[in-house]
Amino acid sequence: MDAGGFDVRFRIAAEDAMITRAMHEKGWSFAVNPDAWVYHAARSSWKGLWKEYFWWGFGAFMVRERFPHTVRPWRFYPPMALASGIVNALRAAKYTGSAASLIIPIHYLYKRTAWTYGYLKARRSLR
């Protein structure tokens, strides 16, 4: 494969993002298949969810090391997530009429805090 195949250093996280970015940079094009199905295992605990988001952040750092222009970490920092969550919660509440959507900022904050922790952990351990 002229994109270089999978990088063996990316066994932990971000292998899909890495190969996609490498293919894109080699000129490959991508298409959306509206009939495609994706299965993603839901996490059964807050700890499992934290680990998933942590590894997303860890992987994002690795992608950024190879493709610096692709990941903008400031967009994921917790204060930005909280602001984004509030905006999206208000939109969802208006659209659905449900107050339950007001927990969105809590989820965004939890997710992005774990992501940021993973990103910073990778930065410390991989440099």
Image (cartoon, helix red, strand yellow):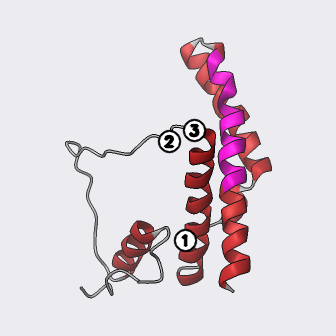
Residues in magenta? Answer: 100-114
Q: Quadrant of the C terminus?
A: bottom right
Q: Secondary structure at mark 1?
A: loop
Let me know if residue 102 is in the magenta part. Answer: yes
**Mark 3 vs mark 2, CA separation in Å:** 6 Å
In the rendered view, would you say 100 is above or below 57?
A: above
In the rendered view, would you say 50 is above or below 64?
A: above
Rendered location of residue 104, percent (x, y): 65, 31
Looking at the image, which is closer to me, 42 or 2? 42
Mark 2, Cα crowd under 10 Å, few <14 / some 14-19 / many 20+, is: few
Quadrant in the picture for residue 116: bottom right
* Residue sitting at x 73%, y 69%: 120
Mark 1, Cα crowd under 10 Å, few <14 / some 14-19 / many 20+, is: few
Name the residue that disc number 1 marks.
70
User: Please, which residue is most extreme toward the left here?
Assistant: 35
Give the amino acid type for the residue marked by disc 3 in the picture.
Ser
**Mark 3 vs mark 1, CA separation in Å:** 31 Å
Let me know if residue 120 is in the magenta part. Answer: no
Left or right of 83, for residue 115? left
Give the amino acid type for the residue marked by disc 1 in the picture.
Thr
Give the amino acid type for the residue marked by disc 2 in the picture.
Arg
Closer to viewer: mark 2 or mark 1 = 2
Name the residue that disc number 3 marks.
45
Q: Is residue 90 visible?
A: no
Q: Secondary structure at mark 2?
A: loop
Nearest to N terminus: mark 3 or mark 1: 3
Looking at the image, which is closer to me, 28 or 58? 58
Rendered location of residue 109, percent (x, y): 72, 43
Q: Are circles 3 and 2 on residues that touch, CB within 8 Å?
A: yes
**Mark 2 vs mark 1, CA separation in Å:** 27 Å
* Residue sitting at x 62%, y 58%: 54
Name the residue that disc number 2 marks.
43
